[in-house]
Amino acid sequence: MGTRRVAVWVVLIVAMLVVPLAGCGIGNSSVARNDGDHANPVRLTLMHNWTGLDAKAIAMRAILDEFRSAHPEIELQDIGLPTDVLRVRLRTLAASDEMPDLFVMWPESMTRDFVKGGLLQPIGGYLDSKPQWRDGFIPHAFDGYTVDGQIYSVPMNLAPTSILYYNQALFDRYLVKVPQTWEELLAAVRIFNEHRVIPIALGNKANWVVQSTIFSTLADRITGSEWFLKAVNQDRAKFTDPQFIQALKLLQDFGKAGAFPTDFQLLDEHQMMQLFIDGKAAMFFNGGWATSYLVQNMPKEALAHTHLAIMPSIPGGRGDPRSVSGVVGTGLGVNKNLEGAGKEAAMELFYALAGPEGQAATLASSTLVSYRMEPDKERAHPLFLELYELMGNVRMSPVYDANLSLPAVESINSGLQEVLLGGNVYKVAQQLQDTQAAAIRR
């Protein structure tokens, strides 16, 4: 670690989440760089999750290609990993102080942890050098990337995590009402099961899906956001409180009612969406990012009867029924060790990906942005415009995995898998409470 000491939480994380690093070719590759020319290029490493077939990933990879063409003096090595793998890999690299020069990271808890570990450098000065860019973001866009008054990144998108996608043709065929209440959602589940249609596609093989796309909003409907944030900080609220137990029980009962495919724990996110695309499932919950995937990959005739809604209200709940869980979006972290020509190259790439042109490319890929920019209504896909209008009329509530400590995120993710498989909700709640409390005490 050199003279820096990475916080104890990182060491504990690595004990749980060891990922092979052989052949990764990552390290502090920008330290003591030369000024860069064709014979001795500046070497720059970037780790990201733009690996899929969604339009956003394709747009980001195109920017990387353009950057390479425009800068032959910079040798850019980009390493793409699926989202769940990226999260773990970054935590593992953090423990050995071998972070890439630039890397996709998440706001709130991950940013705070990386700052605490001495892994990031602030970008406030660079932002101030481009005031038109800095002032173009929506209010509070920097909050999740600000620690002790220093800004460490900017959001590259806007990420509501719990949009309900539904097939209007199936609803019409079986005379099912698009649910606005929990009772109507249960009725829809019953009717679709009677007709051998999967009510709600779910792929929880990477066990963040049910937490991020369903439970974060479901729990907020019951507990309210204020209670959740107090429980995160262990401030007169605990995850063993009755309202959280109620949320776990509601999810478990929903699963028992036949809402999801029986093999949900064996399916990944893309298999989940494919069930919907193929007309085998009437609905699925996913983030706003799924719109980009559907627009890119779904047949036009199927897209024509795909629409969006939010999770129905839950009787007696303390949360805002017109809300969806989410975050302002992922950003780019800048390695603390970057300096000189390496830092200059990194910031130029940062701006290409997250600056106004990068934000416009993201918006054009049917992906929401945390930037004051409207879609071209003549060219944007109708499904994306529907998402854009929907998000203009709802509030974003906290998503669990952006606010809990990493050990607690692992606890709730695996715990929800157990809950849906019939596990003890009290045990799951106690495990989450103990894990988060221990993380706060460190």
Image: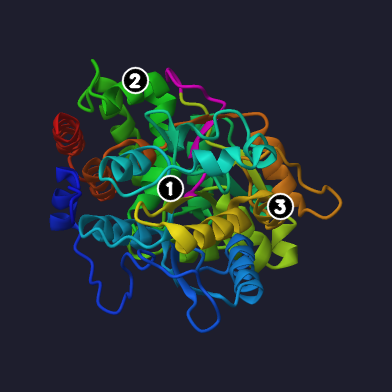
Residue type at mark 2: give it: Trp
Give the SS element for disc 2: helix
Q: Is residue 253 visible?
A: yes
**Front position in the image: 438 or 212:** 438
| Segment tinted magenta in the rendering | 315-331
Return the x and y of residue 324 as percentages of the image width and height. 52, 34
Return the x and y of residue 305 as percentages of the image width and height. 72, 54
Q: Which residue lies at the image location 37% right of the left edge and 29% below the top edge?
A: 148
Decide which of tag 3 and tag 2 comes sooner along the chain: 2
- Residue 77 got which mark? none
Q: Where, quadrant-wise, is the C terminus in this rendering?
A: top left
Return the x and y of residue 14 as percentages of the image width and height. 17, 56
Q: Badge 3, how many Cα within 10 Å: few under 14, some, many 20+?
A: some
- Residue 259 got which mark? 1
Is 20 placed above or below 353 here? below
Q: Which residue lies at the image location 66% right of the left edge and 29% below the top edge?
A: 393
- Residue 360 got which mark? 3
Residue 205 covered by magenta stretch: no
Decide which of tag 3 and tag 1 comes sooner along the chain: 1
Q: Nearer the viewer, mark 2 or mark 1?
A: 2
Decide which of tag 2 and tag 1 comes sooner along the chain: 2
Magenta segment, prevailing SS (helix, strand or loop): loop
Give the SS element for disc 1: loop
**Front position in the image: 355 or 209:** 355
Q: Where, quadrant-wise, is the N terminus in this rendering?
A: bottom left
Q: Which residue carries the number 2 mark?
A: 227
Residue 327 covered by magenta stretch: yes
Q: Nearer the viewer, mark 3 or mark 1?
A: 3
Residues at marks 3 and 2, CA–CA distance in whole angstroms: 36 Å
Residue lying at the far right in this picture: please name it: 378
Q: Which residue lies at the image location 65% right of the left edge and 76% below the top edge?
A: 69
